[in-house]
Every structure is written in structure tokens, then in C-alpha cells.
Image: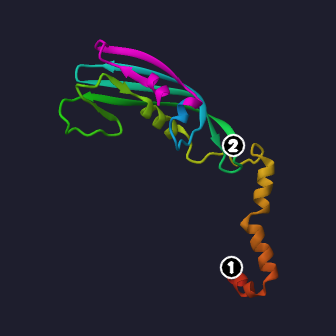
Amino acid sequence: MKSLKQYSIPFTGLKIGQHQFSFEADGTFFDNFEYSLVKNGILKIDLVLDKQETLMVLNFHIKGNIQLSCDRCLADFPHQIDTQDKLIAKFSESEDLEESEEVMVLSKNDVEVDTSGFIYEMINLAAPYINLCENPGETTSCDKEMLLKLKEFSLDNEEENNESNDPRWDALKSIKKN
């Protein structure tokens, strides 16, 4: 977790107004998160922190490439992301305020805000739900050896072999075709 320290911003010495920060994230960043969907990447994070008297607005812009595994052939491929989001950090002396997805509550004892978790969530949310190699619908970019193995062991081939050899399924074939 020591490598995530660079994503913490000490805000106690900052004047009211806008402040800009830049970070980079690579494989060591993702190594800190145990069950990460993204295992590697090279990303540039630009952060504009707007400090006000009772809150801070953190505007993030993340751009770069992440490495994903294809759901079809299991090959690694790069995926470009470009995403923006904001986080609001409120200063509060009472403990009864709850945090939400976009609002972080800071007490009077806090001296810095850790942005690593929010950056990690933004990157994972920018990744596609279904990961396919570059040309979806075309198998030219997928690993051809893996696709041949999958076709060889597919359920359709197994059903065809079983149906032709087992006469008990003949009655069900007529129902299936109707």
C-alpha cells in the first residue's frame, strides 16, 4: 500500500481555489488491488482540485490504455479509455454524515484525501462489461488456435455425436425441429 501514497493529496496547506495535480498509473497501481479486473495499463490522471471553505470538488480525467483479457479467446489486448468524473469531499465535524458514491466526508483531523480508491473504481467502470478483441463480430483478431480448440470441445459438436449414436433421442429430435 506504500505505492498508493502518491495518490494522497495533502489539502491542509492549500489555499482556497483551484489546484492541479497529475498522476500516472501502471501495473504497480493495479497490484495493490487484489481482485482487480484490470491487471496492467499505462494511464495518465489529471486532477483539478477546487478547494472551498466547506468542501472540495475533485475533477478527474483519466486517459490511457489498459490490458484486458478477451472473453472469447483469453488473449490479452489493449483497450483505450478516456473518462471523466468528479468527487466531492465535504468537511464535517459531526460523525453522523454518511458517505456516498460521489461524496466523501472528511473530519477536522484529516490532513489529506486518498484518491487511489476512486481512481481504481473509475478505471474499472470505464472498462467494457464484455471484453472482446479489437474487431467484435470478426474472429480475425482472436487467437485462432484457441478458437479451434473451443469449437472442437463445444457442446454443439458433442450433441451431434451423441444424437447420431443414441436412438433414444429420436423422439425428441422431432419435437426440437417443430
Q: Which residue is more in the foreground, 142 or 40?
A: 40
Task: Work out whether 81 lies above or below 34.
Answer: above
State the residue position of label 1.
176
Q: Position of residue 44 (x, y in %)?
A: 54, 23
The tag earlier along the polypeptide, 1 or 2, is 2
Decide: few, some or many residues near mark 1? Use Cα within 10 Å; few <14, some 14-19, many ≥20. few
Magenta stretch holds residue 177: no
Task: Work out whether 160 lies above or below 153.
Answer: below
Residue type indicated by callout 2: Cys
Q: Secondary structure at mark 2?
A: loop
Report if residue 134 is visible in the image: no
State the residue position of label 2.
133
Q: Residue at x 59, y 48 (%)?
A: 130
137 relative to 96 in the view: left or right: right
Q: Position of residue 166 (x, y in %)?
A: 78, 83
Q: What are the residue bounds of the magenta stretch?
A: 1-28
Report if residue 84 is visible in the image: yes
Magenta stretch holds residue 21: yes
Task: Work out whether 106 lies above or below 9.
Answer: below
Q: Residue at x 28, y 25 (%)?
A: 110
Q: Residue at x 77, y 79 (%)?
A: 163
